[in-house]
Amino acid sequence: MAPLRYHTDRMAPGWTPLRSRTIYTGGALALREDAWRLPDGQEIVYPVLAVGVTVGVLGFVDAGHVLLVGQYRHLQRAVSWELPGGGARPGEDPHAAAQRELREEGGYRAGRFAFLTRFQPSVAYLDEVAYCYAAWDLALDPLPADGDEFLERRVVPLAEAVRMAIDGEITESVSKVTLLQYVARPPDRS
C-alpha cells in the first residue's frame, strides 16, 4: 500500500485519509485508489494517476531565441511542439531533472537556471507537480534521448514561442505555463 501524501497544514477540517492502494503500475506511472472519510462521515474512493515531478525548460540559445522540440504524441495523433522537459526520476531534484531533460531532448547543457514557478496541472486526479525553469548560457552537450522519443528541434524567437502558446499551437501545459510565466514575470538574469 502506497502512503498517502498530503499537507495537514492545508487540509480542511473533517477530511480524513483512510487508506491507499496501487492498482496498476506501468513505466513511470501508477494508478491508485485513495479512500477518504468526508466531513459528513461518508467514505469515498478517489482514483489518482501518480505521475510525480515533471519539469519544463525555456532554454535561450541566445538573448532572443529559444529551443522547442517537436515530438509525436499518440493521444493527439500529431506532432506536439513543446519546451524540453519531462519526468524527474525517483528522488531526483527538479533542477537536476531540468538539466538532464534539456540535455536529452534539447542537446544542450545550461550554465544558468532561474526557477519560474511550480504548479499542479490537474488537482482532481493527478498528483503531478510541475517545475518551470528558464535557462541561459547553453552549450552543446547532448545525452541520448529516451528510446521512444523521436525529436525534431527548432530554434524560434521568444515572441514566436509565446504566440504559439497563446494561439494554441503549443498545448502541452508545462510548456504553456513556463512560457507565459516567463513573459508575465521575467526573472533576474544576473
Image (cartoon, rainbow, N blue to C red):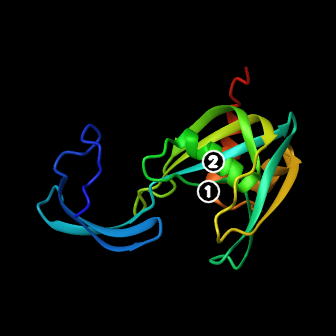
Three-letter residue code for mark 1: Ser
Residue lying farthest to the left in this orientation: 41
Q: Secondary structure at mark 1?
A: helix
Residue located 74% across and 69% down the image: 150
Residue lying farthest to the top in this orientation: 190
Q: Nearer the viewer, residue 41 or 67?
A: 67
Q: Which residue is mark 1?
A: 173
Q: Is residue 91 above or below residue 69?
A: above
Residue located 67% across and 52% down the image: 175
Question: In terms of image quadrants, where is residue 61?
Answer: top right
Gap in angstroms between the C-alphas marked 1 and 2: 20 Å
Q: Which residue is mark 2?
A: 100
Q: Nearer the viewer, residue 25 or 130?
A: 25
Q: Residue 12, percent across and down? A: 24, 45
Characterize the local packing of mark 1: few (<14), some (14-19) or many (20 or more) Cα atoms within 10 angstroms. Answer: some
Q: Looking at the image, tell me whether mark 1 or mark 2 is earlier in sequence order.
A: 2
